[in-house]
Image (cartoon, coloured by chain):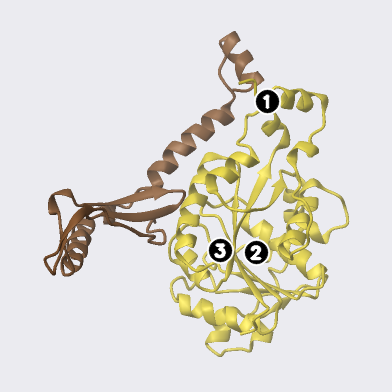
Amino acid sequence: MSENTRTILICSGKGGVGKTTLTANLGIALANSGATTAVLDADFGLRNLDLLLGLENRIIYTAQDVLDKNCRLEQALVRHKKEPNLALLPAGDPRMLDWMKPEDMKKISELLSEKFDFVLVDCPAGVEDGFKNALAACQEAIVVTNPELSAVRDADRVIGILNTSDIEPIQLVINRVRPNMMASQEMLSIEDVQEILSLPLLGIVLEDEQVIISTNRGEPLTLTDGRSPAKKCYLNVSQRLSGKDVAIIDPKNESNSLKDKFMRLMQTKVF
Amino acid sequence: MTLRDLINKLLGRETASANTARERLQLVLAHDRVDMSSLTTDLLDKMRKEILDVVAKYVEIDFEEVAVSLETEDRMTALVANLPIKRTISGEIQFKKDVKNDKNDKDIKK
């Protein structure tokens, strides 16, 4: 196993908070910065990473076939045409739900670590077997959450489990941030979420309609040329993940209408 | 209290929902985090007995005063045992003193 490979679990507990979108965008961004990157879809019951990357028609084999010696690893890896440093490996087929064990996932991640600088593991929602399998394959974790009650609560459960493993570091990404709702105190603030979960903050991602559009097209935002709030955030997270000393994007600077400024003034502590 | 809260209060309006969210979340998490139902009852008793057995091999303990409990703070759960010692086994009478035994059980939480 290569010592320099970073195998990172991307998990959340709750579904629909943006794990897969983050995995796809980070994968592209890291690959684009020159690091060879593999994204492993550990959610083989309901896999979607292929769709987000626009690779759904190119999957022939899965990691399962590699372990069963039906094919070589190179054959199962789906290289991205526009970003050759990135490869997708689906863990398994939706039709075979319960063959996989933590040891299998470990073997797959060891195989991948021989070839890649980064391995991002897109974890299934929940805290059951699928999550524990994915966990066994990783050394680091990124917990994705939204600034809302149910997502933070589920993230807390996941963090509780991660803390009993030897995963280190565990970092937090707060997704779907709406600066103007935070300004008017109708959404949990970044500080609130971070304080409650007591994890180091890797970054935030702003709510952005472009995410939906890019999903429709099967082209992650970090692959496109345009400028969009979420793209800027994904790039920021990717840089921070690879150790660059850049500041976290502050939602306060992302909403500068007069109304938001006034709303922030209203947050001044009076006593 | 923020300026906004103050104005809301003066006008008799509801406070911003982020505060409500934070308070509800803190309550529910406090509950979630101490949910160690498997450890709190039978297992804790069993563990207490075994710890006492071991310690009793070396010193005589004041069984009336023994307290073993789990304390949770900041994601860390600690087993805190307070075992007052009466005397050592060799018979030498000691002053009653507290032995505080902190074992940082690395997060037993679910």
How many numbered circles does the render carry? Answer: 3
Q: Residue at x 67, y 44 (%)?
A: A176
Q: CA distance from mark 3 to mark 2?
A: 10 Å
Q: Which residue has dot 2 on it?
A: A49
How many neighbours does mark 1 have within 10 angstroms: few (below 14), some (14-19), or many (20 or more)? some
**Mark earlier in primary sequence (2, 1):** 2
- Check if mark 2 and mark 1 are on a common chain: yes
Quadrant of res A78: bottom right
How many neighbours does mark 3 have within 10 angstroms: few (below 14), some (14-19), or many (20 or more)? many
How many neighbours does mark 2 have within 10 angstroms: few (below 14), some (14-19), or many (20 or more)? many
Q: Which mark is residue A123?
A: 3
Q: Residue at x 46, y 70 (%)?
A: A97
> Which is nearer the eye, B53 or A249?
B53
**Residue A75 horizontal/vertical position (percent):** 68, 85
Q: Residue at x 56, y 10 (%)?
A: B12
Picture quarter with the C terminus of chain A? top right
Q: Let me know if residue A100 appears in the view.
A: no
- Which of label 2 and label 1 is nearer to you? 1
Q: Which chain: brown? A: B
Q: Which residue has dot 1 on it?
A: A267
**Identity, as a three-letter code, of the amino acid under mark 2:** Leu
What chain is tagged by disc 2?
Answer: A
State left or right for residue A251 relative to residue B93: right
State left or right for residue A11 relative to residue A25: left
The reply to whether callout 1 and callout 3 are in contact (CB within 8 Å) is no
- Check if mark 3 and mark 2 are on a common chain: yes
**Mark earlier in primary sequence (1, 3):** 3
Q: CA distance from mark 1 to mark 3?
A: 37 Å
Quadrant of res A40: bottom right
**What is the drawing colour of chain A?**
yellow
